Image (cartoon, rainbow, N blue to C red):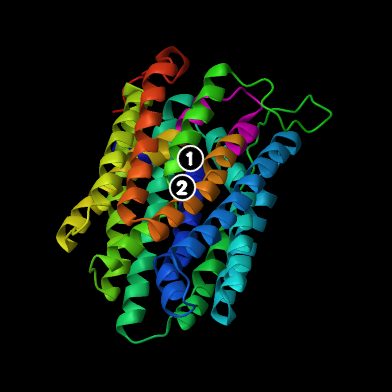
């Protein structure tokens, strides 16, 4: 497997490195956002759900737009570069935000940037590899992305231990953001691309196989229970995890995802995607239900976060590889656009519902709601989606 990873094309490694640098910037802020909003701007879980829901819903819409445009124009690089430029500009502006509405605006811009670059990036990655290497390639990308999510929280923890104000940490994100843009500018478009025969942009699911459409429905139901991870950090803080350990807790998840993301995704090339997704969704349901139990200890939270890291490792790359497996030729961008749209836009009701239940009723019931959504998605995936329509085992990776 090691030789296979090393032999992956330059574009795969470059995209992974870009994501590593970008996430080192964004993840410096992510674990601090719920703390900043609750302690500085006095924003509760309900408002936090609205902020994250609006931001991610906007991102999802632009993921479809950029994906469709990529299929029509056969150009991925301009959208990737533009997305990273906008994101790099937006993050430091959080330092001057004086109300939670300004935070919403800035987060909206940051997620818009993610929407512009995500589907083109995924399509470029799928075009750069052979079909029987999609799992390992997407797994490597997610591992490197999560490596940045280790660096970012560790830097945040270091800054906090040195007494650096949260607002100043926002400003420091400029450095990795500049490096990210420089790397994105060195991307090369694929030499051979499928020319679009359509004269008009197609925004519908016309031409997509039924298995892909079913997969979108199931993924959407699961996403309804997969609210913003900021709630997990908020729950950890309320359960007694010290402030300075919150970024480290997030780094633990990213470390596990980085280490196990590539090998688990590579195994899906051999043994199929469905079983990995099903096992991961069971782990997700257990994690969320356990997180909601009253009186949970700090040690138990760290153990549960390790399970959550394994869930992310087993799904992030595999889900993207499955989209590429099911997408017709010439519609990769549109397929990724629809997948990103459905899973992302569901974060709006997911975060709103979760935040409302969390604040108005009790955290336990919010976490039970998420667990129930995961179980429902598991059952539909197991019964409704036929293995014949999914990725079949490929030649074993050596």
Image quadrant where one finds the C terminus: top left
Q: Quadrant of residue 151?
A: bottom left
**Position of the N terminus by quadrant:** top left
Do the CB atoms of the residues marked 2 and 1 lie less than 8 Å apart? yes
Q: Residue at x 82, y 31 (%)?
A: 200
In what element is the residue under mark 1? Answer: loop
Q: Which residue is mark 2?
A: 13
Say if residue 347 shows up in the picture: yes
Residue 156 among magenta residues: no
Q: Is residue 23 above or below residue 97?
A: above
The residue tagged 1 is: 9
Instruction: Say above or below: 213 vs 11.
Output: above
The reply to whether residue 14 is in sight is no
Left or right of 75? Residue 157 is left
| Structural crowding at the residue carrying mark 1, measured as other residues with C-alpha within 10 Å and reported as few (<14), some (14–19) or many (≥20) | few
Say whether residue 243 is left or right of residue 36: left
């Amino acid at each position: 497997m090691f030789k296979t990873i090393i032999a992956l094309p330059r574009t795969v490694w470059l995209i992974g490195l870009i994501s590593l640098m970008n996430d080192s910037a964004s993840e410096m802020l992510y674990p601090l956002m719920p703390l900043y909003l609750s302690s500085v701007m006095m924003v509760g879980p309900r408002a936090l759900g609205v902020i994250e829901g609006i931001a991610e819903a906007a991102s999802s819409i632009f993921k479809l737009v950029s994906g469709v445009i990529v299929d029509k124009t056969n150009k991925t690089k301009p959208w990737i570069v533009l997305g990273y430029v906008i994101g790099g500009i937006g993050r430091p502006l959080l330092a001057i935000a004086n109300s939670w509405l300004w935070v919403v605006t800035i987060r909206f811009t940051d997620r818009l940037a993610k929407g512009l670059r995500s589907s083109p990036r995924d399509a470029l990655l799928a075009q750069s590899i052979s079909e029987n290497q999609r799992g390992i390639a997407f797994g490597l990308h997610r591992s490197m992305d999560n490596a940045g999510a280790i660096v970012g929280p560790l830097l945040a923890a270091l800054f906090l231990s040195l007494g650096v104000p949260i607002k100043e940490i926002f400003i420091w994100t400029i450095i990795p953001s500049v490096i990210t843009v420089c790397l994105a500018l060195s991307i090369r478009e694929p030499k051979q691309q499928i020319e679009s025969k359509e004269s008009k942009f197609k925004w519908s699911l016309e031409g997509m196989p039924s298995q892909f459409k079913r997969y979108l429905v199931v993924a959407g139901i699961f996403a309804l229970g997969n609210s913003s991870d900021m709630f997990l950090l908020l729950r950890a803080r309320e359960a007694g995890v010290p402030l300075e350990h919150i970024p480290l807790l997030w780094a633990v998840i990213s470390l596990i995802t980085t280490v196990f993301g590539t090998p688990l995704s590579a195994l899906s090339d051999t043994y199929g995607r469905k079983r990995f997704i099903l096992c991961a969704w069971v782990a997700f349901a257990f994690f969320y239900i356990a997180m909601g139990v009253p009186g949970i200890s700090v040690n138990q939270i760290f153990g549960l976060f390790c399970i959550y890291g394994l869930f992310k490792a087993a799904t992030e790359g595999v889900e993207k590889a499955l989209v590429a497996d099911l997408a017709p030729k010439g519609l990769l961008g549109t397929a990724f656009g629809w997948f990103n749209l459905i899973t992302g836009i569901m974060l709006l009701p997911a975060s709103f519902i979760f935040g409302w239940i969390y604040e108005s009723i009790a955290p336990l019931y919010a976490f039970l709601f998420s667990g129930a959504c995961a179980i429902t998605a598991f059952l539909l995936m197991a019964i409704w989606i036929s293995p014949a329509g999914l990725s079949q085992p490929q030649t074993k990776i050596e």
